[in-house]
Structure formats: C-alpha cells, structure tokens
Amino acid sequence: MTFTTHTGNRGLVLEEKLIFEQGQAGRTGVDLPEPKGTKSRLGGLDRDSDVGLPGLSEPQVVRHFTRLSQKNFGIDSGFFPLGSCTMKHNPRINEKVARLPGLSDLHPMQPESTVQGALELMDQCAHWLLVLTGMPAVAMSPAAGAQGELCGMMAIRAALDARGENRRRVLVPESAHGTNPATAAACGFTVDSIPATEDGRVDLAAFEAKLGDDVAGIMLTNPNTCGLFERDVRKIADLVHEAGGYFYCDGANFNAIVGRVRPADLGIDAMHINLHKTFSTPHGGGGPGSGPVVFSDALAPFAPIPYVVRTENGFRLVETADENDGTKPFGRLKGFHGQMGMFIRALAYMKSHGSDGLRQASGDAVLNANYLLARLKDKLSVAYPGYCMHEALFDDGFLKDTGVSTLDLAKAIIDEGFHPMTMYFPLVVHGALLVEPTETETKESIDEFCDSVLHLVGKAQSGDAEFFKNAPYLTPRRRLDETAAARKPVLRWKPETA
Amino acid sequence: MRYLPLTSADRASMLETIGASSVEELYSDVPDGALLDAPVDLPSHLGEMQVERDMMALAAKNTGASSVPSFLGAGAYRHHVPATVDYVIQRGEFLTAYTPYQPEIAQGTLQYLFEFQTQVASITGMDVANASMWDGATSCAEAVLMACRATRRKKAVLSGGVHPHYREVTETYCQYSDTEVAGRDGNPEQQATVEELDDLIDDQTACVVVQYPDVFGRVQDHTKLAEVCHAKGALLVVVFTEAVAFGAIKSPGSFGADIVCGEGQSIGNALNYGGPYVGLFATTQKLVRQMPGRLCGETVDQDGKRGFVLTLSTREQHIRREKATSNICTNSGLCSLAFTVHMSLLGEDGYRRLATLNHENACKAADALDAVPGVTVVNDSFFNEFTVKLSKPAAEVVETLVAKNVLGGVPLSRLYPNRSDLDNYLLVAVTETNTDDDIAALADALKEALA
Ligand SMILES: Cc1ncc(COP(=O)(O)O)c(C=O)c1O
C-alpha cells in the first residue's frame, strides 16, 4: 500500500533536515564552565562576528546522526562486494584496543622515553608487513594507498637522481587505477599506457617494445585490477630491471595472496599496502586509510622520514635525515609519524589471524570469488577466461540489446538489499562489473547474492528495461541527479536571505 | 578462526562447483616456486582475550598525555571529546561504509559531508570547503600546488611562521614538479613583516603561505599581506594547526585569503600519536574547480526530493587520471564525521566558549610561567599556545619534567634540529583540559628544573 504521510517519514525511514535547519540560538550540546572575562591577548584580532553555527542539544545531535546512519549501507549491514575495495569484516576488538589509554591519548611530540610501547607497536606492525611481503624495508608514514604510491614513486625519482639519470617515462597498464597515473604525474613523470592482452594481462611484447633508457619504471597492480594474477610478473620485473628501471607494484589487491605469495619473490622494488583493505581497518565512509610501502634494497635508502629504529637502549624515532647512517630520505610525506590508529587496528587483525589464519583468509577470499564466478559465468559475460583471484570481473555483453546498463543493474541490486559491485572499473572492460566477495562472506550469502543477480539478469533479458531504468525504488532517495549537481554546484548550506 | 565462516564442507562443495581440485589450483597462475606451501614465519592466531592483553601490554609502556599534566601542541592538541562523538563514529553504518559511490544508500555519509563542508567554510570564513584531506601538512602542500595551477606560476613563498612539518611536506611535494619553495625558517623573537614577504614575491610567485596563529603561537593580521599578494597576482594561503582558534579570533576569510587549510584534529579527534587526523580545505567560489579532493553537493532525486552526491569529479584521479588536480582517493572520512559531530554539539555558543576557555587558560599559564625564574614568555599575542625562553636547553628540561611526571611542552629543537639558536625555546600549549593544578605542577616543575 502506498500513501504519503504528513511528515514525509515512512515508518522507520525518517526524513532528516540539515543541522543548520534545526538549530536554535542559545541551545548547546556541551556544558562548559563560564569564562572569567580575562583580558584577551589575541593581538587585537578578537572575533567580532558570528561563526554561523546552529545550536542543538545533545539528544538532538544523537538523534540526527542516528537517523543519518540509518540511510547508509556498511559491511555491518550486508553483503558489500565492491571490487578493488576489499570490504571485509571490521573486528570490534580492533576498535577497542585503538582506544586504550596509553595509545589513543599519546601526543606525537612526546619524548621518546614516554612512548616506547608506541614505537614498539609500529615496529611490530612493520615486522609483520616485512615478513608477509619478504621485503627488507618499509615506510610506515603514508596516509593512504595513493600516498603510498607517491612514496614509492618519489623513492624511484630519488634513486634515479642519485644515479644521475633523467628517466621520466613511467609505464602504466591501461587497466590501472586512476591514482597510478595521477601519482606518476605528481612526481614529474610522463605516463605511457601499456595495452592488455586478450586474457586481461600486460601485453608482454608491447611492454618490451616500450622499454628504453628514458623509462623510470613500471607501475603494475598485481593481482591486477581485472582480478587476475600477472603470470609474467617475473619476466616483467627482469625486463624492467635490465632496462635500468624500477618495479612499483600497486598492492591494493594484496588480500588475494597474503601468506601465500611474497611480493619479494616476484622482483618488485616498492609496493604499498592498503591497511584499510587487506588488514581490515574500517573504511569509515571514505577514510582514514593507511598505506605503508615496502621497499627493496635498491630503494630502501631513499625512504621518507620519519622511521623507527631499534637500538640497544630501546626504540628511537628518526625524524631528520642523518648523513652518517647511509640513508638519503627523499623528504617527509605527512605531519608527524603516520596513521598510528590504523597500525594498532592492523596489528590486532594480524595477531588475531596469525600466519595460519592470514593464509586461510586469502585462500577463502580467492575461493569465494571463484565460487561466485562459477555460479554467474553462464548467465553473465565473463571478461577473461580462467580462474580469478579475489574478485570476478564481468563485462556488460550479457546486457547487450536489453536497454539495461551496468548502472541500471547495480541500482536494481540495491533494492535487493546488497551493495552493488564496482561499476565501470577497470576501464579496459566495457561496462565493467567487478565483484569482490572477500573471505568474510558465507557460502549462503554468496548464493543469495548470485540467485538475486541471476533473477535480475533474467528479468533484464526478458525485456523489462523500464523497471531497471527507474531503480532503485525502495531506498531513502531514488536515483539522484548528478548532472544537475555538477552544473550548478551547491556545496554548502546557506541561510535563506530574506 | 572467528572471522572466517567457511567450513571444510563448504570449501569442498564450492571447489566442486568451481571444478577445481584444491584452493592451490586456483593459484596456478603464480610462477613456479613463488607459491608458498606453508605459513610464513610469524606467530599463529590468537583469541580475542590474548590480543587485548598484548595490546594492553604495549599501551602500558607509554605515558598517556591524559594521565599526567600535559602541555604539548605544535600541531596536535588534546581537547575533551564528548562521549557522543565516539558513539556516533562507531555506528557500523558509518564505520563500515565505503566512499559514497552509490548515493541512494549513502545519504547518511553524504549529508554529514555536506554539513562538514558548511562547518569548515563557516569557521574559516570561506565560500566552500571540500570533504577532507589527509592532514594539515598535506593540505598545505596541496594548497600550494592548487595555487600554482590557478595562477600558472611555479613558486611559493612560505613564511617562517609555518610549521616545519608543513614546510617539509610542501617541499617534498614540490620537489619533483619544478615548483620552487622560498622563504626561510622563522624566529620566535622576530616576526616577518609584510615588506619582507613582499620582497620575496615576484612574477612567478603563485602564493604566499602564512600560518595563523603561527607555529610559535603568535596571532597576526594578514589583511595587508592579502592586498600585497593580490596586487602582484599571487594568492594568499592561510594554514592553521588549531581549528578551535577560530572561535576566538577573526577568520582568515576576513583577511581576504584565497585558500585556507589546516588541521582539524582538535575538534572531535583523539591525539592518536599523530594520526589519523583530518585536513580541512576551504577556498573561494572562484577557485572551486581547482580544488583537490572530494566534494559533496546538493541535488534532487527522481521524485524531486533533496539529496546529496559526490560532485565535480572531473577534477579527480578516477576520471582525469594523470591530469587530475590531486592523486587523493581515500581521505579522512570518519575523522571528518567526528569533527562534524563535535561541532554540532558545540554549536555557536559552545564553539565560542571553548575557544575563550582555551585562551583564558593559556593566559593563566603564561602568567604563571613568566613568574618562574629562568622562564620568559616570548609572545605578545597568542591563542592557546606560546613560546617561552628558558635558561637551559629545552630538550633537557623536558626530560627532567618527564621524571617529575609532567609533559611540559615541545622543545623547538625537536621541530628545528638544525637551529642551535632555538635550543632554549619551549612551545607550550594549554587547552580547556588543563586544570589550575596542572598549571601549578608545570610551573613548580620548571622552577626546580631551572634552579
Ligand atoms: C587498485 C587500486 N589502487 C590504488 C587505490 C588507492 O588507494 P587509496 O584509496 O587508499 O588511496 C585503490 C583504491 O581504491 C585501488 O583500488
């Protein structure tokens, strides 16, 4: 039965105004002591106008954000197979320990003697990452995957500078994530795209033909963004090294191989690890992340400051370049020392799994993806043949002539109660649908998802395009007009002018 | 393993559906010899109780800044975070969501981002703000790069009052893009004048960057500097490390700043030993399309109801690739939620009062310390942080204070290791969390340490 309510609310689906539309002057959600009226020493710059913030009581604020939260889908809500993003369970023990007094309340500029446990924790987290990757060095400070890329590519620039070489071309597969070319450009490199073969991997001949003495290196994602292991990865490493370049590996898909394949054994020189993917630190609706970078011996001396060293007298935090220790850091990437809150969570995750559990997790992630692939491959169009790694990639061939697009299908999947897969990425596959179930999911939940998708695909193929064009129907908001948003951007609330 | 639901029976039946004999077979693309056949050399799995014990043991080796009188600032500040903030950010619908790529099931995230952008624009006095950056230092670097794009020039002048980490990160970001970073380290005893900065501006200067309040705590009017910059076709970038300050002092927007960015940790976020924090980034309407980072905008849905989406994404890496305004993807989502919730609780009255209390406490501490023999307060003006000159090297004094269970401040030598002329200076931050007893403890400890 459909009818409109007086309030616009629909049972538990509650409309919620902006805080700016519900405040009252004089209301507040905090009780702070009365100021004493001390004469100010603000250099004569005392604020003389209102900031323009609304006043709300604590219960209003709680209710506001609770209502907003109910318009969101998270991993806690349900199946979230967003390819390339590794939406795995976020254990609550990690949240608990990250909030321990003695960890969450450490100031980054405390004397070393008062933060030995914190430095030890960073060192332990680094140790796990080093053993899992087989690499000799790690920079912990990068804030996210993209900053990890910056870290790796800057180390390559610094190493080339040290060699006195002016190599400026970086080879990047067409299937790469947008952050790869953006990062290369930010380091002053030019981007040269390498095409993919029919089976979704780097075209070795095309790659070899592009090598030359102006090539700084390659940025390769492995497992790649098509969810496939680059079979020729060692050959690629050898070739780029012979040509005098370096091998940057985008480790966003490390979850497929943790505890089973060590990137060091593949010949890489640098790789970022998204702790917010592989090691379960929450995505938080967009961040924060953490992107430590492991380095080969060739690049290790150029790693940025700061870093932790273990000495006879405990742990030390090196914050400035020291000419005498043989290092030549390329600089500093971030204020202070990195995403400590994420190191705590990632370490708790790694300790919980142990080396046995991590290996089981990657195996289950790959098994889940291949199971999903097997269940869908006859009705959807598989982008590339063979087994996949931790994510399954389809193109939109199965929707040909239905009038239904990848986007339309995704919106209908929303109504079924799932978060859709990644759409239209990687760009090399037409209308891409990238599905990553992760090891978190049960066989039952994958079956339920596959059954729903197969049902929807049948419906699309039977000519009901109109249904898909108007999906979703059951969400707090229907399809949103993104074109209008971009044409005349409204990026903040403003008071009505009378 | 408690997080892994598949049973042996599940695995066997799934392999059968796949048509593979083992999980190892799924890894058949891995080159010979690279597939490990046993777990790596790390400890085995642990139950939740043991993990918690291990982490508590590490925590116990630290002295938390809330366990003793603490006066550290220099870019990170201890403030009281209301319990509501932590409750909201731990709601799974916020905590475990991804970037809002499917707006119909992410209106919660999108609406608070719109509120966040409005709050940031309001406190900085600017037209618009983005949906967050990684931290204050990276925001500063991105502001310089943005100014270079907007002016098509390749030089930035950084005032000596800019936090050394912000300067270092900016230099790091600029070094491989042919962008010159000019301007020298600062001096707590002497402030750069508008004329000195003016001299450094030439026809290649994209922007001048000042910090407000500056790294030594001083509060300075930059209206004249904005005029000088604009007359020469350069932008004024104002950075900040303490977002509470704008409750008490004029906004940078009121000076005529073009980009205002800095650290938002102070509001809603714990110290976390330096991260994760949240970069705030605001600018003028005119420069919106040059901005880095995600932006949330208002729109309507198919039924005409107001809703929110990520917008202007043609600036970003996933669309523009090597021509993007920045490579940033994952930002500081949950930290911006913490900021938004705390700001919502504060409101106009709470925010202004919080700032006033910080300033009053700092005034009280400055007077108490100035009375200690061997201590001189250097600043004429400050918000909640000021520099004192000691009769002994500050790093040693700070160690002595640790032995007396006081975290006494940040020695400038920690920020400027190559500036021996700054060895005797200490940066002291005082917030609403510091009690009168804390201040007395600091003054007493300093008295003994300097005697
Ligand atoms: C393949 C790939 N590379 C890089 C990134 C960038 O990582 P982050 O968002 O942590 O900066 C992503 C994240 O979406 C990715 O999927």
Image (cartoon, rainbow, N blue to C red):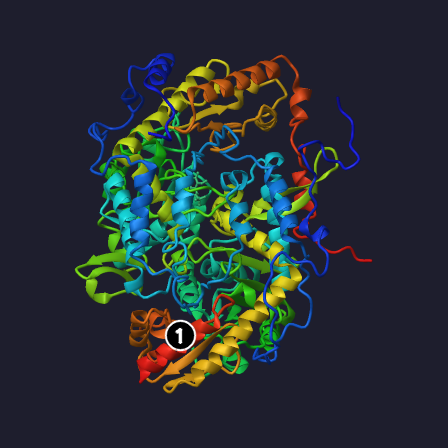
- Mark 1 is surrounded, within 10 Å at the Cα level, by few (under 14), some (14 to 19) or many (20 or more) other residues, namely many
List the single residue furthest toward the front. Answer: B437
Q: Where does ligand 1 appear, by image quarter?
A: top left
Q: How many marks?
A: 1
- Chain letter of disc 1? B
Q: Work out whether A392 lies above or below B349.
A: above
- Image coords of residue A289 (percent x, y): 43, 46
Does residue B254 lie above or below A27 as drawn?
below
Q: Is residue A132 left or right of residue A181?
A: left
Identified at 22% across, 37% down, the residue is A265
Residue B6 % position (x, y): 37, 22
- The structure residue drawn at horizontal position 43% and vertical position 39%, both measured from the top left corner, is A92
Pinpoint residue A493: horizontal percent, then vertical percent.
Answer: 69, 52
Residue furthest right in the image = A498
Q: Position of residue A331 (x, y in %)?
A: 34, 61
> With respect to residue B319, does A108 lie above or below?
below
Q: Quadrant of the N terminus of chain B?
A: top left
Q: Residue drawn at (36%, 48%), measured in percent from left and top? A: A343
Q: Nearer the viewer, residue A492 or B316?
A: A492
Q: Is residue A325 visible?
A: yes
Question: Seen in the image, is A428 located left or right of residue A140?
Answer: right
Q: Residue at x 42, y 16 (%)?
A: A374
**Quadrant of the snapshot with the C terminus of chain B:** bottom left
Res A291 visible: no
Q: For the residue marked with disc 1, what is the amino acid?
A: Ala
Which residue is the site of mark 1? Answer: B441
Query: Is B19 in front, or is A398?
Result: B19
Mark 1 element type = helix
Residue nearest the viewer, comparing A362 with A78? A78
